[in-house]
Amino acid sequence: MSAIPSIEGIHNILVVGAGTMGSQIGLVAALAGYATTVQDISAEMLARAREQLAARLDATVAKGRLAATDAEAALDRLAFATDLDAAASRADFMIEAATERLEVKEQIFARLGRLAPDHAILATNSSTLGSSKVAPATGRADRVCNMHFFNPALVMKCVEVVRHEETSQATVETTMELARRFGKEPVLINREIPGFIANRLMGAVQREALALAAAGIASREDIDATARTALGYPMGPFELMDMVGLDVIDFIARATYAETGDEADRPDPQVAALVAQGRLGRKSGQGWYRY
Ligand code: 3HC
């Protein structure tokens, strides 16, 4: 097989990390017809992911949105594994959605660079680390890029494909096409920039919402309602922060500020205070709101 990654050469997908993003990305790939392995070092995470995805498929079938046979076929195409090396040796395309720690990602990418077939593209779902940070570890920097999905990955149409200086045109085209085959609407980002497009837009709205609430101009509820009813956003900024997770919001802000040093990117102390209290949003039962 040639080292030019083409869409026709992609049959097996590997998703590294079975958290909220990784597991749903895995199901997106399986629903699109790809033999997919979701890998995680934690067997417990894998078991939970399998259970949640099966429940989600059941609910979709119950709503009449998916034929029961298609749901079954998608689950059959989806494998869950703790062994990264075995999964990597078969993968034509890898999407890493593991923890946002550079040293962990570097280790994963170094291993994949060694073990994955020569033609395989190694993508990262990271929202805070440009793929240029992990590309040198792979020995195939031209076949490395960001492929950034949005939460909930089964629903949100956008995928940001971010190239770094050495990413080849073939890698970009194949990644964009794969996203389309996943039923997504990819956008291309030509140069790495902290926050890419979506998180920069989201950050701007959040900053303004936090400032308005902190100044007592309006309640959080009314700011959220305005975003929904005046601007047509599906959720207000506070609701969205709670859905994404305040720890994630805080992490993105810290990473962005560390890179840009721009005062506009300074992490918000109110968000940090909630995180310190364990109020992380929906997942912990309380964030800006109670659930
Ligand atoms: N996982 C999977 N599917 C979900 C879901 C979840 N957590 N929550 C809802 N859905 C599905 C529902 O099953 C339903 O599917 P159906 O159309 O087949 O019936 C569909 O989404 C609509 O759900 P609901 O009718 O229950 O509720 P809403 O119409 O309010 O939609 C929403 C829910 C899709 C989450 C919508 O509110 C929304 O789009 N919110 C904004 C999300 C957003 O902005 N995401 C980006 C976050 S930023 C990010 O991810 C970047 C990262 O780097 C931080």
Image: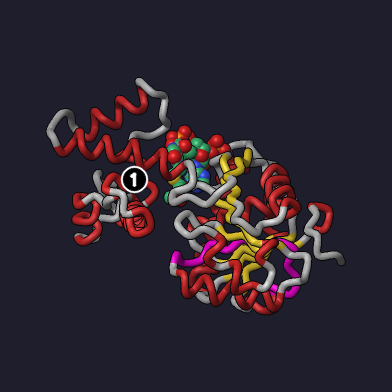
Q: Residue at x 58, y 39 (%)?
A: 157
- Whether residue 286 is visible: no
Q: Is residue 140 magenta?
A: no
Q: In this view, does 230 lie to the left or right of 263?
A: right
Say which of 94 and 151 sits in front: 94
* Residue beneath disc 1: 241
Q: How many marks?
A: 1
Say which of 72 and 189 sits in front: 189
Q: Residue at x 56, y 41 (%)?
A: 158
The percent coordinates of residue 133 (x first, y second) are 52, 65
Q: Which residue is drawn at 58% across and 55% down?
A: 146
The percent coordinates of residue 85 (x first, y second) are 66, 79
Q: Residue at x 18, y 36 (%)?
A: 213
Question: Which quadrant of the structure image shows residue 208?
Answer: top left
Q: What residue type is labelled 1?
A: Met
Quick one: which residue is furthest to the right in this view? 1
Q: In the rendered view, how is the structure colored?
A: secondary structure
- Whether residue 67 is visible: yes
For the record, the magenta segment spans 87-100
